[in-house]
Image (cartoon, rainbow, N blue to C red):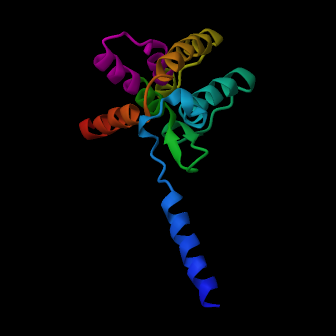
Amino acid sequence: MRGHLRSRAKRAARKHKHQVVRDHGGLMMAQMPWRMRATFGPVEDILTTLETTGDIDADKDGAVYRAPSSHVWYDLAGAIEGFAEFYEAHARISGREMPTRSLRQLANKFAYGVMIFQSDVDAVRRDLAILKQETLPMTEHYTTTIIQSMTEEA
């Protein structure tokens, strides 16, 4: 009986050694498709909704969006502005121009309740494709650092 308890303790100690804390900081976004979906999915979902039904949720202050992961409602114009600001911060760091103009225009249309046309949706989709390609080689640590610097500035 004593040997059984000792071997159980040894197994537990070995198991503890093999447990790895997952730090994705050094992984590129291309290696984390779930992060890419979490980043671009909400904007793509909004664009699809605009194309199919045109129904966007609103409250007394304007268009809102419910985040699927947290079930919290966000100001849609502000969320899209934040998305554009992230890539503008990346542009300052990388020295490459990022196509955020269509995102800014869409955010303004939501903010002021202006009609959104198919050409607006097409422009945002075109720019999102470029931004996705720009995002693939980014590491999670890099993206987190940009987001933290943005929140410190605000």
Q: Residue at x 59, y 15 (%)?
A: 125
Q: Residue at x 33, y 35 (%)?
A: 145
In the displayed structure, 21 sits above or below 115; it is: below
Magenta-colored stretch includes residue 99: yes
In the displayed structure, 23 sits above or below 127; it is: below
Q: Quadrant of residue 47?
A: top right
Point out the residue furthest to the left here: 153
Locate residue 138, reporting x and y percent.
43, 26
In the displayed structure, 19 sits above or below 135; it is: below
In the rendered structure, the answer to whether residue 48 lies left or right of residue 125 reads right
In the rendered structure, the answer to whether residue 106 lies left or right of residue 8 reads left
Locate residue 92, reporting x and y percent.
29, 18
Q: Residue at x 59, y 17 (%)?
A: 116
In the displayed structure, 97 sits above or below 92; it is: above
Q: Quadrant of residue 31?
A: top right
Q: Which residues are drawn in magenta?
A: 85-108
Point out the residue furthest to the right here: 52
- Camera-side residue: 15 or 25? 15
Locate residue 55, reporting x and y percent.
68, 31
Locate residue 95, reporting x and y percent.
30, 12
Magenta-colored stretch includes residue 30: no
- Camera-side residue: 117 or 13? 13
Considering the image in quadrants, where does the C terminus appear? top left
Q: Main secondary structure of the magenta part?
A: helix
Number of dots carrying numbers: 0
Considering the image in quadrants, where does the N terminus appear? bottom right
- Camera-side residue: 120 or 59? 120
